[in-house]
Image (spheres, rainbow, N blue to C red):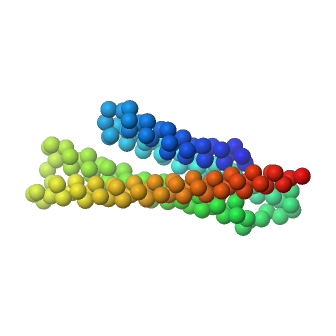
Amino acid sequence: MLLALIVWIGGIIFFAFVLAPTLFGVLPTTKLAGDVVNATLTKLHWMGLVSGVVFLVCSLIYNERKHAQMKLFSAGHIFITVMLALTAISQFGITPRLRRVRFQLELAQKPDYIPYIPGSTPRLIARSTEQFNNLHAWSTRLEGGVLFLGLGVVILTARRFENRN
């Protein structure tokens, strides 16, 4: 249970505060850094989804054995469920849309790109950039929400084991 929580929250902290800023500061192009971040974020989401389910199952089993009831609606379980939902929204809703918009931007910025409507390339780039920025902001908010809820679960879990005796 604790390992699952450590993997998930530790992964988010490492990604947000170490990996992503380092990639954008070290790699020669933002496209390359974005490609690595995109692949890494997908792995992070899957780690979170698996870790969340493992935590939830282990916690329910622990409660059943310790208290003879699962306590389905405890604060920690609700937080983990919301974290899973936010992660799923990010992985299956926001991330694919970010990929599509990124591809549109890359395509529109190629010198041999022929837009369907003459003169629409600057508008397409501006619209796609705005869409990308909005989606990125939502992605960041969702990850931040998962992180803060996860820290709440850490506190609740620490208290839970502190009160074991």
**Image coordinates for residue 165, horizontal then vertical, percent:** 89, 52
Judge by depth and name the residue closer to the eye, 7 or 61.
Answer: 7
* Residue 32 lies in quadrant: top left
Left/right of residue 115 with respect to residue 56 in the rendered view:
left
Residue found 77% across the figure and 54% down from its top: 159
Most foreground residue, 92 or 38: 38
Q: Is residue 125 left or right of residue 85?
A: left
Residue beneath the point at 72% across and 46% down: 2
Q: Residue at point 17% right, 55% down?
A: 122
Question: Is the residue 7 above or below the residue 154 in the image?
Answer: above
Q: How many marks?
A: 0
Q: Is residue 97 visible?
A: no
Instruction: Give how far across and how far down residue 40 sits, in percent.
Output: 47, 41
Residue 36, position as x, y percentages in the image? 41, 39
* Name of the residue lying farthest toward the left: 118
Q: Quadrant of residue 133?
A: bottom left
Which residue is located at x 36 percent, y 59 percent? 134
- Expressed as whole percent of the image width and height from the top left, the position of residue 156 reads 72, 56
The reply, left or right, for residue 71 in relation to residue 134 is: right
Q: Quick check: 124 above or below 112?
A: below
Hey, which residue is sitting farthest bottom in the picture? Answer: 73
Q: Is residue 143 visible?
A: yes
